[in-house]
Image (spheres, helix red, strand yellow):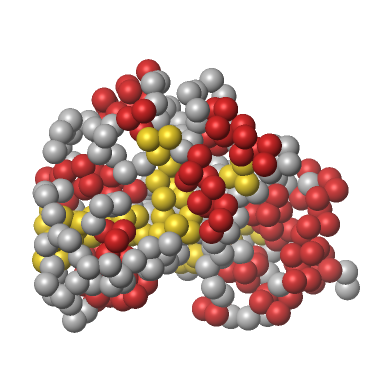
């Protein structure tokens, strides 16, 4: 049996878990080809696994393939038959991860980008308020975001102010066509708005990016080949110092789910209120956070069954810490100030 046959015999479910994808019944995510984490209709992961465990299909971008293609998309960003000389990287990955392929899904640790590369990307970003772009200004205006308050940076692409700064980063990477292996340079043109994602100790371990063109098929994306389990968004003034174990300087903490609600909440939250956004699959990791004993904690959730379930999951995750629930839609009213 060849190494390719051995990988195929391991099954799509085991390989998906080895790649750090999360599973819900017969669906896994994010998609290694398009990066979508959840279906917009039923909130399930987008990638369906075949009943015989030999292949997969993403219901968001229609990419399909066998087990080898699943690995190739995650590691190389393309189909196995298009990998060329880089196909050998799949074999290296298989040999190094042989023991993990035999493990149970629950034992695998999240796969995250190298921290130094995350910091390099964040350092290359420009403050939103400093970027002179009609397209960016139009997006912020439509969404009601204040450029000086949105907790994000802009990763420039060719033609944007600051591109020379990014070009220097590419030169430092010895002329690669990607800034880093997990973030193709062309992505900066599609998802230029970059938000840092932190682990429980406040270390930047990944990024989440937002498109500013409403015509984009996919509004947000995570790095390719990794996932977001165990990560959080944290406002830079109150929440991130709290994650790092520093004395809490506020009196309230607002917890919300996902990138969009996090951005709205940071902009709209009252003074002395820290905002923490929960990345997909990270609710169970909240017990590890440094929760101040004298702060009032609020869960922002919509007044519907989905919001009920989400609020209950958070409350259970941080129990016995007491928390209150508020309807998050009151924070989504566009505003240009604080």
Q: Is residue 299 visible?
A: no
Report whether 145 appears left or right of 27.
Answer: left
Q: Residue at x 46, y 50 (%)?
A: 207
- 296 w.r.t. 273: above or below: below
* Residue found at the very far right of the displayed protein: 1
Report whether 66 appears left or right of 313.
Answer: right
* Residue found at the very far top of the displayed protein: 134
Q: Residue at x 50, y 51 (%)?
A: 119
Q: Judge by depth and name the residue closer to the eye, 337 or 78.
A: 337
Q: Judge by depth and name the residue closer to the eye, 142 or 151.
A: 151
Assign the C terminus to one quadrant of the image.
top left
Quadrant of residue 102 in the image?
Answer: bottom right
Q: Judge by depth and name the residue closer to the eye, 279 or 198.
A: 198
Q: Residue at x 79, y 64 (%)?
A: 92
Report whether 79 appears left or right of 294.
Answer: right
Residue 135, position as x, y percentages in the image: 39, 21
Q: Residue at x 48, y 59 (%)?
A: 205
Report whether 271 appears left or right of 62.
Answer: left
Residue 260, position as x, y percentages in the image: 31, 45
Quadrant of residue 303 in the image?
Answer: bottom left
Residue 12, position as x, y percentages in the image: 65, 65
Assign the N terminus to one quadrant of the image.
bottom right
Q: Is residue 164 visible?
A: yes
Number of numbered discs visible in the structure rendering:
0
- 153 w.r.t. 45: above or below: above
């Amino acid at each position: 049996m060849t190494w390719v046959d051995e990988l195929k015999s391991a099954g799509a479910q085991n390989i998906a878990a080895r790649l750090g994808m999360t599973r819900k019944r017969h669906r896994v995510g994010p998609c290694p080809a398009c990066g979508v984490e959840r279906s917009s209709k039923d909130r399930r992961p987008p990638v369906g696994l075949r009943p015989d465990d030999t292949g997969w299909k993403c219901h968001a971008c229609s990419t399909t393939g066998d087990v080898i293609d699943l690995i190739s998309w995650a590691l190389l960003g393309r189909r196995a038959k298009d990998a060329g000389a880089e196909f050998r990287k799949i074999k290296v990955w298989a040999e190094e991860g042989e023991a993990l392929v035999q493990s149970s899904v629950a034992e695998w640790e999240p796969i995250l980008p190298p921290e130094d590369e995350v910091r390099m990307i964040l350092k290359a970003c420009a403050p939103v308020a400093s970027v002179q772009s009609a397209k960016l200004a139009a997006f912020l205006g439509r969404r009601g975001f204040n450029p000086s308050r949105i907790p994000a940076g802009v990763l420039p692409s060719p033609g944007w102010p600051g591109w020379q700064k990014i070009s220097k980063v590419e030169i430092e990477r010895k002329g690669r066509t990607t800034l880093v292996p997990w973030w193709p340079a062309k992505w900066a043109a599609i998802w230029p708005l970059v938000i840092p994602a932190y682990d429980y100790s406040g270390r930047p371990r990944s990024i989440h990016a937002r498109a500013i063109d409403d015509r984009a098929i996919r509004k947000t994306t995570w790095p390719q080949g990794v996932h977001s389990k165990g990560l959080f968004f944290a406002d830079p003034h109150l929440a991130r110092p709290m994650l790092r174990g520093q004395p809490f300087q506020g009196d309230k903490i607002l917890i919300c789910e996902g990138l969009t609600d996090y951005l709205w909440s940071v902009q709209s939250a009252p003074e002395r209120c820290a905002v923490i956004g929960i990345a997909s699959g990270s609710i169970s990791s909240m017990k590890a956070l440094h929760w101040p004993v004298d702060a009032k904690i609020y869960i922002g959730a919509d007044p519907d069954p989905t919001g009920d379930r989400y609020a209950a999951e958070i409350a259970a995750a941080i129990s016995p810490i007491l928390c209150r629930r508020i309807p998050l839609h009151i924070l989504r009213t566009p505003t240009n100030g604080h």
